[in-house]
Image (cartoon, helix red, strand yellow):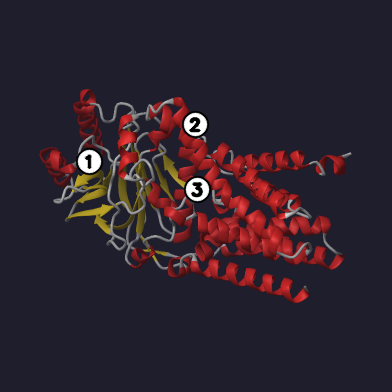
Amino acid sequence: MLPTLLSDRRVRLALAAAAGAALTAAFAPLNLWLLALLSPALLIALWQDVPPRHAAALGFWFNFGTFAAGTYWLYISIHQIGRAPLWVAFIAMGGVVCILSLYGAFLGWVAARWLPAAGGVRWMLGLPAAWLLVEWFRGWFLTGFPWLSLGYSQTGTWMAGVAPVLGVYGISGLLLLGAGALVTVCAGTRRERLAAVVVLVVIWGVPAALQRIAWTRPQGPAVSVAIVQGAIPQDEKWQDAHRDAQLDTYRDLTRQALGARVIFWPEAALPDVAQNLGDYLLDRYHEAHAQHSALVVGMLRQAHNGDFYNSILTMGESVDWYDKMHLVPFTEVIPVPGFARKWLEFMNLPYEDFQYGAAHQPPLAAGGLTLLPAICYDDAYGASNLDMLRTANALVTVTNDAWFGHSTARYQHLQIAQMRSIETGRFLIRAANDGISAIIGPDGRVLAAAPGYVPVVLRGTVVPRVGLPPYARFGNWLIISLAATTLAAVLFFRRSRT
């Protein structure tokens, strides 16, 4: 009965979509991490002995299930907060999900057209290598969307021991290798099954051993920090009627935090550009300086030429700026022609056109910490700014996840921040408008977290750390080169056998 059902094309497509949707449960907040191994294994099995067009359809619906279930919160930002018409919200969200699903379709077509028809070489080498390259490509092509990369699901497992060596994509590669090994155990020859068992032992044993290595070392005493979480509702953020109340909120909370060596505010904490709040910011600086505190403030700023930037301002021993490098398409930057911009204005869609920050910016110094900064979407790009780690001894992320309401987005985003700590072996201070504000240790554990959706000050300490793990030296190029070489070898193997 089961083989008969699986021969039905519609059943196979439904299974692919279900497996893709189930994959999202591997990530926070559910953290059913084993699904990051089982869901890809099921798709690899479904891809067996099917023509290229059907393999492409299977890949499409697998990714559709993943991104429809995993990024449903786009609807909240577009319709509920952005107040776009319902039909526009569904078209926009559906368009994003379909575009991301095309990556799976391409992978399925390539697997059916170019990889060996069956066997361990296909399942444990060819498909994992090709899948990893597509995942990496998705992370940067046309600004990229690295969300829900497989490796993020393992921040709480010993598999995370690979991150300081090969980064999040290294973990993705091991998971895909394990998924291929599971298929090989079920369908391979006796020799291939033995090899697959060895692979399954290695992919769990090696990360566990690597996790015991201290890739970085402390530099100086612990530094006291405080995170100011204003909890400003997004639908009130830019209303003039609420402007003064927001300024009072950050003033009062910052006064509670005085005495900490460094005080952090979230992304775009105040409802105006810095140039219009000069006196207010100067007052906060004088109050902090009198208590030997430095301020690290998420602020919007306007350059002399009129360009807008989403930035971080530090006010301590010196005043410095960091400008956001990775802007969110269709919210912070609109990659469409002028006539389309007019249409967006007419439809009352939320958008601002910011400028990209420079590719090379120095780290930020405040209160004894030298910080590698990230603003919201920046922290999804682990290989960015790795050159700062030669001097940076801690990480900071300022963000505003209120755009996505009470959804899973904030938990997924926190998990990304945890991976950045593991990759670099450094503490990370995460200041979020309404949560999850947190202090994360160099092993990715959340050491302290503020309650969500309430104004609060979160206090803690971080220890400056120095040293360069292998990933900090090579970025993604080590694992990507390995995947590309493996895929080339598999294609050559297939051609020589043919």
Instruction: Identify the residue under disc 2.
Output: 90
- Residue 497 badge: none
Quarter of the image for the C terminus: give it: bottom right
The residue carrying pointer 2 sits among few (fewer than 14), some (14 to 19) or many (20 or more) residues within 10 Å by Cα, namely some
Using residue 198 as the reference point, say whether residue 57 is left or right of it: left
The residues tagged by marks 2 and 3 sit, at their Cα atoms, a distance apart of 20 Å
The residue carrying pointer 1 sits among few (fewer than 14), some (14 to 19) or many (20 or more) residues within 10 Å by Cα, namely many
In this view, the mark in front (1 or 3): 3
Residue drawn at x 42%, y 32% as measured from the top left: 78
Instruction: Identify the residue under disc 1.
Output: 258
- Residue 147 badge: 3
In primary-sequence order, the first of circles 2 and 3 is 2
Q: Which residue lies furthest to the bottom in this view?
A: 496
Quarter of the image for the N terminus: give it: top right
Q: Does dot 2 land on a helix, a strand or a loop?
A: helix
Number of marks in the rendered image:
3
Expressed as whole percent of the image width and height from the top left, the position of residue 109 reads 66, 56
Vertically, is 485 above or below 425?
below
Q: Does dot 1 land on a helix, a strand or a loop?
A: loop
| Residue type at numbered disc 2 | Phe
